[in-house]
Image (tube, helix red, strand yellow):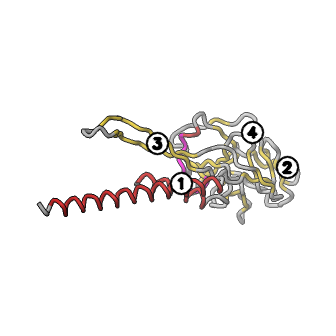
Amino acid sequence: MHAMIRQQERVANNLANVNTVGYKRIRTFTQALDEYLDEEGAPRSERRSTQWADLGQGPLESTGNPLDVAIEGEGFFVFSDDDTGALAYTRAGRLTLDAEGALRDLAGRSVEGEGGPIQLLPSGGPIEISKNGEIRQGGQVVGTLRVVIFENPEQLQRLSGAAFDAAGIEPETAENPVVLQGFVEASNVDAVREMADMIVFYRQFESQQKMMQTTDQILGAVTRDLGKF
């Protein structure tokens, strides 16, 4: 029953982020360890469940916003916290400008370029982002989006929403990234599938609960009958 509760929590979290840009659904894997038969011949085992993010690409949605970017294929954008310097990696490319012209994500983190945080020109002008991540404003190059890849991306640790921590793993610079301006990558959560999973886990929990209630009733009846002798 505890396992079913954890599965329900996982599915609920996925459903809550079905509209979160760049979100990667949580999946679980349960491993049976030390399988054996108990004294009554019933099978027993120790089970260990682990969670990881399904990094499959979500659908690309056109927004027409020049500050929205998406990566086609593998890779992550890099953001940095101004206070701690901590780096976050994400596929969510919904960007914005602050009052000083610094390029940031919606959480307020600086957008990292190949030469550091990207700062746009105070004079303004139209913003163009090429497929290799190069940013031009008014025809002048102001920076290039930093896009990185990981040899084992499944080892990334989720921070919040669509952002991940490298957990000490060193990323590599993507050689030929494909960055699309005016697009965002939607969540890769399939709401219908998650709802179906939720129903399955609820039914399994319900059946386990009924089994415990039945067992309790049988034990209660046995206890009463034994008291008669």
Q: Is residue 11 positioned above or below 176 on the image?
A: below
- Spatial CA distance of label 4 from label 1 is 40 Å
- Spatial CA distance of label 2 from label 1 is 56 Å
- Could you tell me which quadrant the C terminus lies in? bottom left
Q: Secondary structure at mark 2?
A: strand
Q: Quadrant of residue 161?
A: bottom right
Given this view, does label 4 or label 1 mark the residue nearer the observer?
1
- Magenta residue span: 155-162
Label 2 sits on residue: 140
Label 4 sits on residue: 177
- Could you tell me which quadrant the N terminus lies in? bottom left
Mark 2 belongs to which amino acid? Gln
Label 3 sits on residue: 30
- Spatial CA distance of label 2 from label 3 is 53 Å
Q: Is residue 37 positioned above or below 144 on the image?
A: above
Q: Is residue 22 positioned above or below 50 on the image?
A: below
Q: Nearer the viewer, residue 62 or 127?
A: 62
**Residue 147 x/y as whole percent:** 69, 42
**Residue 184 x/y as whole percent:** 75, 53
Given this view, does label 1 or label 3 mark the residue nearer the observer?
1
- Spatial CA distance of label 4 from label 3 is 35 Å
Mark 1 belongs to which amino acid? Val
Total number of numbered labels?
A: 4
Label 1 sits on residue: 200
